[in-house]
Image (cartoon, rainbow, N blue to C red):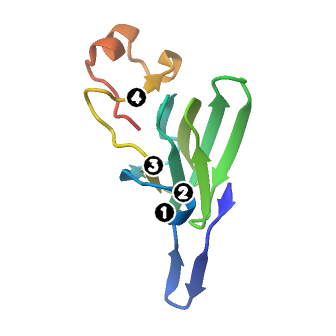
Amino acid sequence: MQKLEHYIDDRGWLVEFVKSSRIGTIAQVKVINFKEPHIKRGGHYHKLKKEWVICVFGQCVVKLTDMKSGKQETFFLTKPYERLCIDPLVYHIFECKGESPCIVVVATDKEFKEEKPDTYYNVNELNNRSALEVQSGINRPSHL
């Protein structure tokens, strides 16, 4: 987890989430709303895509598993000036924690493309969806 440059005054806060001089090219930025606590998103990994994540509202727990080493880590995103980097081949799942909804911002170095999603799911994490549904695209979960 990296602490970002941020500025706080009586009006609120400003965070410098992305600087290309520090992380390279950003291809896509997504804002993810978890409408209530205990909602989970993700449950996948990417072979090529790198992601940077901040939680701008509420609290989010991110569980990571390195697909090569098996190493597991858990991060609590509670401050908008703390950014988590998720490398390729790292399985990740997000869960809204606390008493309120949360909002997460994710920047990626590659765009999501429906025809080549670079998104690989752990079927056990897919909340009552069958492997056949996932493979065929029926009710396919969103890519985050």
Which residue does the numbered mark 1 point to in the structure image? 20
The structure residue drawn at horizontal position 39% and vertical position 43%, both measured from the top left corner, is 110
Kindly check if marks 1 and 3 are in contact, taking CB atoms under 8 A apart as contact. no
Q: Residue furthest bottom?
A: 10
Q: Check disc 1: other Cα within 10 Å, few if <14, some if 14-19, many if 20+.
A: few
Task: Quickly name the residue at label 2.
Answer: 23
Q: Residue at x 58, y 39 (%)?
A: 87
Regarding mark 3 in the picture, which secondary structure is present there? loop
Is mark 3 in CB contact (under 8 Å) with mark 2? no
Question: Is residue 42 shown above or below 12?
Answer: above
The kind of residue tagged 3 is: Glu
The amino acid type found where label 2 is placed reads Ile
Question: Which of pointers 1 and 3 indicates the residue nearer the eye?
Answer: 1
Q: Secondary structure at mark 2?
A: helix
- Say if 110 sits above or below 138 in the image: below
Q: Which three-letter amino acid code belongs to the residue tagged 1?
A: Ser
Relative image position of residue 70 (x, y in whole percent): 71, 23
Mark 2 Cα shell of 10 Å, populated few (<14), some (14-19), many (≥20): few
Which numbered disc covers residue 36? Answer: 3
Give me the C-alpha separation between circle 1 and circle 3: 33 Å
Q: Amino acid at mark 4?
A: Asp
Q: Which mark is residue 118?
A: 4
Q: How far separated are the C-alphas under marks 3 and 2?
A: 31 Å
**113 or 127, which is in the foreground?**
113
Asked whether the beta carbons under mark 2 and mark 4 sit within 8 Å of each other, the answer is no
Q: Residues within 10 Å of mark 3 (few under 14, many from 20)?
A: some
Left or right position of 142 against 108: left
Q: Are marks 4 and 3 in contact (CB under 8 Å)?
A: no
